[in-house]
Image (cartoon, rainbow, N blue to C red):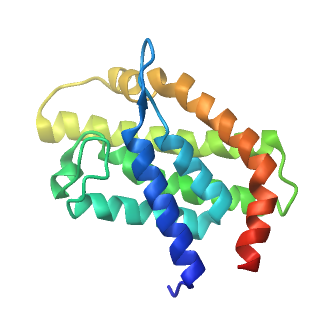
Amino acid sequence: MKLTTKEITLVSLFTALITIGSKITIPSPTVPFTLQWMFVALSGMLLGARLGSLSMVVYVVLGLIGLPVFAKGGGIGYIVSPTFGYLVGFIVAAYIIGKAVESMKGNITFFSVLLSMSLGLAVVYTIGVAYMYLILNFYIGKSITLAKAIWTGALIFIPTDMFSAVLCSLLGVRIARQVREIIDKV
């Protein structure tokens, strides 16, 4: 895959944003709110499927080689962390959101973007919960039911993640066309 200087810059920018988003935590009564998911969603929406998912791949690779870009650090050992599946889900979600927005061909509406982000979020939850369940039960040896994995790995995060999806959809609809025009011109 050959990338232009502009594409490398955009991928790097969103890799940096997801890293920053993983470090910013806003306390809430139940689950802390981070900006991580918001930048995953925006990467797919604004950069498209190819570059959005590539920015997430770069983020994951940087973390796996030991840079402390993940919420709790980095390193190859993260692969056996119960939360690693969410990182894999970020790659797939950015791709799906990007493909969905690309298929809108300029007819970008709040509800269509929100639907694509909801689909991306469902993918993150599915991959993340399945990975967490498998790692906890079969690698770490901590028995957890599938229902408990779904509760702790997805359901309690839905309000804050959907809030992020709504914000991204509002923001994205307003700036997507302008950002695409700027990207295409540069």
Name the residue: 45% across, 44% down.
21
Q: Is residue 11 left or right of residue 70?
A: right
Name the residue: 71% across, 56% down.
100
Picture layout, residue 70 above or below residue 61 = above
Q: Nearer the viewer, residue 119 or 33?
A: 33
Asked if one can make out residue 96 in the rendered structure from this viewpoint, the answer is no
Location of residue 111 in the rendering, given as x and y in whole percent from the top left corner: 80, 39
Q: Is residue 93 left or right of residue 75?
A: right
Location of residue 141 in the rendering, given as x and y in whole percent from the top left corner: 11, 33
Name the residue: 15% across, 28% down.
142
Picture layout, residue 3 above or below residue 15 = below
Q: How many marks?
A: 0
Location of residue 115 in the rendering, given as x and y in whole percent from the top left corner: 71, 41
Picture layout, residue 30 above or below residue 50 = above
Q: Is residue 28 left or right of residue 100?
A: left
- Quarter residue 145 falls in: top left
Picture layout, residue 67 above or below residue 171 = below
Furthest residue toward bottom: 2
Task: Tell me the quadrant of the picture where the C terminus can be found.
Answer: bottom right
Q: Nearer the viewer, residue 34 or 153?
A: 34
- Quarter residue 183 falls in: bottom right
Location of residue 179 in the rendering, given as x and y in whole percent from the top left corner: 74, 62
Q: Nearer the viewer, residue 70 or 88?
A: 70
- Quarter residue 137 falls in: top left
